[in-house]
């Protein structure tokens, strides 16, 4: 089987010869800086060149956000650029315009057709995007204080999502598509089910069926503990989740029991990657029953941290390949 056949097979809960050995997200800059001091060739700058250096299966990815060039920027990290509808009107000419580079998509489409790569895209979700506009603290107040504007923003975002997805599909249909939300922290979701149903659900119910109509699986990316919110997203048609951070208490084994048909990506405890072979084997052993059952693309539960040495990472990949074979041949 080739890379795309494996990814599609797993997403469809079909038998595969082995699981893909891939990185779903780029490495931290600090991690790569460390590795270049420890043996990673300095000439490798492109993410996919580094993937080939490590012998990884290629799952190509891009993130599209609604900002256009020239949009005002926040005054500080976590601050916003919108306080009211007048502000939103003022920056609206700088929003919802960027569309994908057709040359890049055409090249990826050829690789995808040959089965050399799988493709996914990440876009701002209906919690993430208003927060980018309001800022972290003001966004949470906006559910109460700026309800009309929140709906207007998410309606505009939903229209942009449909336009963006249709543009992408002129060149290729992604193997999966993901909404970035980061709506959870280590104790659970940042909002209630009532707020989700009132401010996010209507727009997911508009966009998700449009994406799924092309045979594309739809994921949500939220850090922290997604356990409670998973049901909310499941109810609007979401089919998969990442990165399933173990340090926030997320247990993919328990989630598989609760959601038998849900797809998962990530879940390998990044903190085990610097603790030696026994710790890494224990983590793979924890995941192996879910790996064998399909619907699960294993990966680091966020991005490989700089505490992981170049030697550690090679050991991780050796074990990853071993368990990927074990899971595939017995699926």
Image (tube, rainbow, N blue to C red):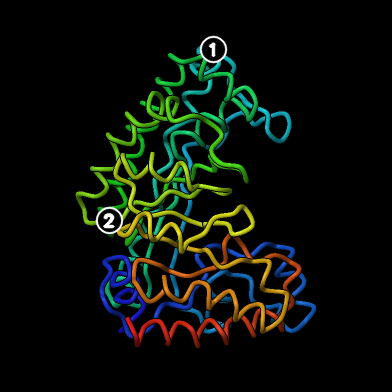
Q: How many marks?
A: 2
The residue that appears at 61% across and 52% down in the rendered structure is 248
Q: Residue 166: x percent and y percent?
A: 27, 46
Q: Residue 205: x percent and y percent?
A: 28, 35
| Rendered view: 163 above or below 191 | below
Q: Indicate which disc, 2 or 1, sits on the residue closer to the N terminus.
A: 1
- Crowding at dot 2, Cα within 10 Å, few <14 / some 14-19 / many 20+, comes out as many
Q: Secondary structure at mark 1?
A: helix
Q: Residue 327: x percent and y percent?
A: 40, 82
Q: Quadrant of the C terminus?
A: bottom left
Real-space Cα separation, disc 2 to disc 1, in angstroms:
36 Å
Q: Secondary structure at mark 2?
A: loop
Residue 324 falls left or right of residue 76: left
The numbered disc on residue 216 is 2
The residue that appears at 56% across and 41% down in the rendered structure is 188
- Residue tagged by mark 1? 145
Contact check, label 2 and label 1, Cβ < 8 Å? no
The residue that appears at 38% across and 39% down in the rendered structure is 232
Of the pair 152 and 20, the residue shown nearer to us:
20
């Amino acid at each position: 089987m080739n890379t795309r056949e494996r990814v599609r097979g797993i997403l469809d809960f079909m038998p595969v010869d082995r699981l893909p050995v891939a990185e779903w997200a780029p490495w931290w800059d600090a991690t790569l800086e460390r590795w270049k001091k420890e043996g990673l060739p300095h000439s490798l700058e492109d993410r996919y060149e580094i993937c080939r250096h490590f012998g990884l299966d290629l799952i190509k990815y891009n993130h599209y956000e609604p900002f256009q060039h020239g949009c005002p920027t926040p005054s500080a990290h976590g601050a916003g650029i919108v306080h009211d509808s007048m502000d939103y009107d003022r920056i609206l000419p700088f929003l919802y315009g960027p569309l994908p580079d057709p040359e890049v998509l055409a090249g990826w489409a050829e690789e995808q057709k040959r089965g050399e790569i799988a493709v996914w895209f990440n876009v701002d979700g209906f919690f993430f995007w208003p927060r980018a506009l309001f800022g972290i603290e003001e966004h949470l107040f906006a559910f109460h204080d700026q309800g009309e504007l929140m709906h207007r923003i998410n309606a505009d975002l939903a229209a942009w999502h449909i336009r963006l997805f249709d543009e992408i599909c002129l060149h290729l249909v992604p193997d999966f598509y993901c909404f970035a939300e980061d709506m959870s922290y280590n104790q659970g979701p940042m909002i209630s089910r009532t707020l989700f149903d009132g401010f996010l659900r209507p727009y997911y119910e508009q966009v998700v069926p449009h994406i799924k109509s092309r045979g594309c699986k739809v994921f949500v990316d939220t850090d922290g503990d997604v356990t409670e919110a998973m049901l909310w997203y499941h109810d609007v048609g979401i089919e998969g989740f990442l990165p399933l951070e173990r340090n926030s208490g997320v247990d993919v084994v328990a989630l598989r029991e609760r959601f038998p048909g849900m797809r998962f990506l990530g879940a390998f405890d990044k903190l085990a990657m610097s603790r030696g072979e026994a710790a890494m084997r224990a983590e793979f052993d924890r995941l192996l029953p879910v790996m064998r059952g399909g619907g699960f693309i294993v990966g680091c539960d966020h991005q490989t941290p700089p505490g992981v040495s170049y030697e550690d990472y090679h050991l991780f990949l050796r074990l990853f390949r071993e368990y990927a074979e074990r899971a595939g041949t017995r699926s």
